[in-house]
Amino acid sequence: MNKEQSWLADQLPVLVSKGIITEEIAAKLRNYYQLHPAEERSGWRTVFVMLGVLLLALGILLLLAHNWEQLKRTERMFVIGSGLIVAQIISAYVVGWRHESRFWREGAATFHFFMVGASIFLTGQTYHLTDSYDNFLLLWLMLSLPLVYILRSAMAAALIFIGVGIGSSFLSDGIVQLLIPLGATEFWSGQLLWFFILVLLPFWCQLAEQETCRRETHLLTVLLLGSAISTFAVSTVGQYDYLAPLRWMYFFSIFYFASVFLKRPIGSNWRRIFRVTGIGGALGISFLFTFRGFWEDLLRPLNYLFPPSELVITVLLGLVVLAGLVYWIRRQTAAQWMYTSLPAILSLAYAVHAFSHNSIIVMVGMNLWLLFVGIFWLQRGIRQDSLALLNVGLGVLIALISARFLVDDNLGFMIRGLVFIGMGAGFLLVNWLVARRRKGGQSE
Amino acid sequence: MTNRKHLAVLTVLALVQLSVLFYMVCHWESVAVRGQVVKWIIKPVDPYDFMRGRYIHLDYEKPYGPWLDSKPGTSGDRVYVLLDEKSPLAQITGVTRQKPEHGLFVRANLGWMDEQGQVHVRLPFYRYYMPEDLAPAAEKAYRRTAKRQALAQLRIRDGYVVVEDILLDGVPIYTYLQNNIPQPPTSAPTEE
C-alpha cells in the first residue's frame, strides 16, 4: 500500500465519525482503492512483536532453568512465582486498558503462556521430579487454555495446538494416569484428548469468519488439522487392528465433507486446506491398498482382531461419512462425487475382503478404481483447463505406475501384465477422448 | 464479553494458576522436609550415560521384588513398592497394586516379570538436576568413584519421593565437587 492509500485508509474512519461520509461510502472507497483494514496492514508488525515476546519469554525460561544452586528452594519458588504474577499483571493491564490492540493482546498471551509453563516445569526441576512430565504438560495447557478467549489471542491458540500436536502421546498418558484409578478404560480416557481441540474450535471459527486475518487463519487451520491428526492417531491406535486403515479413510473424508457442506465459518481460506488434507489423506490410504501386502497383513490373526471400542469409533465415523455421501449424491454433480467415492470403494473392498479373505481380488479392484479416478481427473483437467485437476490425475497415475513397476516384485507376470494392459488402455482412451474433442471443436 | 467480565475471568484464572503452583510447592516441600530419609544405592551405569544434559540419571540398584497380589499386573500399571524400614539401605520387600496403609513405600510403574518371578518396576525419580557448568565436573567425579559406592539420598512421604542429594563416597555431591574440582594454576591471573 502506498503513502496515499495509507493516508486515505486512516482518514476514512475519521470522516465517517464526523458524519461527512456514510459507512457504506467508506466501504465502497476501501473496495475501490483496495485499502486493507489496519489490522491486516499491521500483520507483519504483529508477527515481529510476537517473535520478540517469544524470544524474551524463552530467554527468561533459560535463565531460570540455569538451576541457580546458590538459591534456596523457597527463594527459587519465589522467583518462579514472581514471574507468573508479572505475566498475570501484564495480562490484566491489557484486558483492562489495551484490549483493542492486537500487539498487546498477542504479546501478553504469549508471555503469560510461557510463564505458566516455566512455573510448572521449574517446580519439577527444583524438586527433581521426573515422571510427572505427562501431567505437567496437561496442567500447562489446561491452565493456559482460557487465555485464548480472555485475550482473544491467535498465538496462544497456535501454541496450544502445537502442544497438543507434538505432545499428544504425553497428554494422553497424563489423562489416562488421572482417570484409570477412577475406573475409566484406557481407550475412552484417551478420547478426552479431543477436549482441547473442541474448546478451541469456536475461536478458530470466529477467526475463519473474518477474511481480514488471513495469515492467522491459514496458520491456525494447518495447526488445527495437524493436532487433530495427531490426536486421532494417539487416541485410537491401541494396536494396528483390522479396521485401523478404514478409520483413517473415514477420518480424512470427514475433512473433505466439512470443507464442502459446512456453511459456517463463511471464510474461504480454511476450506482449501481442509479439502487438500482430506483428498490427500484419502488418496494416500487408497494408494496403500493397491499393494497386495497391505491386504495380506490385515489377515494376520493379531491384526484381524479388534477391540469393541475401536469398532464403535469406526462405525460412528462410517455413519458420518455415509450421511455425507447420501447428501452428496443428492446435491452435487457427478464430477465432484469422484472425490468422495474413495471411502465408499474402500468400504466395499473391506466387505469383500472380510467375507472372501481374497487379497488379490480387492487389490486388483483398488488398482482399477484408482486408475479410473486418475484418468477421470486427468480428463476433467484437460477439458476444464484446470491445472490442479490435471496434476492430481497425473500424480495418481504416476504413483500407480511407479508402484506396480518399481515396488511390486511379488506379483506374478500375469497380474502385472493385466494391470499394465489396463493402464495402457486407459491412457489410450484418454488420448482418444481428448483428440476427438479437439477435432469436434475444430470442425465447429 | 465486556472488559470487566474479561477481567473477572482473568482474575479467577490467575487465582487458579497461583493455587496450582502453591499446591505443588506445598506438596513437594512437605515431602522434602517431612519425608523419611532413605538411601538407595545407585548402580554403576555407563559413565558416558551418567550425565544427560543438566541432570544426573539415577539408575537404582535392584529395582525389583516379589509380586504380592493374586492377580497378575500389566506393564505400566501404577504399583506401590514396599521398602524394608529396618535396612540401612533401601531394599524392596514386595510390589503390590494396593496402596499400603502404613509403612515405607514408593509409587512406581510396573515394568516386567523376570524368569525368577521377580517384578521389575520403573521408579519415577531418576533425575537429579544440576547447574550446567557443574555437569562435566560431576561426570568426572562419578567416573572416579564408579567402582566405589554412590548413593541417592531420598525423602519419602506417602509414597512420593524427592531426591534430596547424591552421595559420592558418603560425601554430598556439591561438597565432593568443591573439594575435587581442579584449581586453576597459581600463576594464572585471577579476578578479585
Image (cartoon, coloured by chain):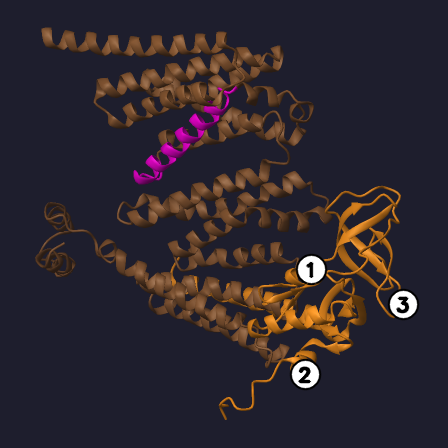
Give the residue type at disc 1.
Asp
* Parent chain of label 1: B
User: Can you identify the residue that label 3 sits on?
Assistant: B87
Q: In which quarter of the image is residue A140?
A: bottom right
Q: Does the magenta stretch include residue A280?
A: yes
User: Can you identify the residue that label 1 sits on?
Assistant: B46
Q: Main secondary structure of the magenta part?
A: helix
Q: Are marks 2 and 1 on the same chain?
A: yes
Q: Of discs 2 and 3, which sits in the foreground?
A: 2
Front in this rendered view, residue B63 or A26: B63
Q: Considering the numbered disc 3 on the image, is that residue within a helix, a strand or a loop?
A: loop
Residue positioned 37% across, 19% down in the render: A338
> What is the C-alpha distance between the residues marked 2 and 3?
30 Å
- Mark 2 or mark 1, which has the lower sequence index? 1
Q: Considering the numbered disc 2 on the image, is that residue within a helix, a strand or a loop?
A: helix
Q: Residue B9 carries which label?
A: none
* Parent chain of label 2: B
- Mark 1 or mark 3, which has the lower sequence index? 1
Q: Is residue A369 left or right of residue A236?
A: left
Query: Which chain appears brown?
Result: A
User: Can you identify the residue that label 2 sits on?
Assistant: B179
Give the residue type at disc 2.
Asn
How many circles with numbers are drawn on the protein?
Answer: 3
Query: Which chain appears orange?
Result: B
Residue A71 sits above or below residue A373 on the image: below
| Magenta span | A264-291
Give the residue type at disc 3.
Ser
**Residue A1: % across, % down:** 14, 54
Q: Considering the numbered disc 1 on the image, is that residue within a helix, a strand or a loop?
A: loop
Mark 1 crowd level (few <14, some 14–19, many ≥20, 10 Å Cα) = few
**Residue A155: % across, % down:** 39, 56
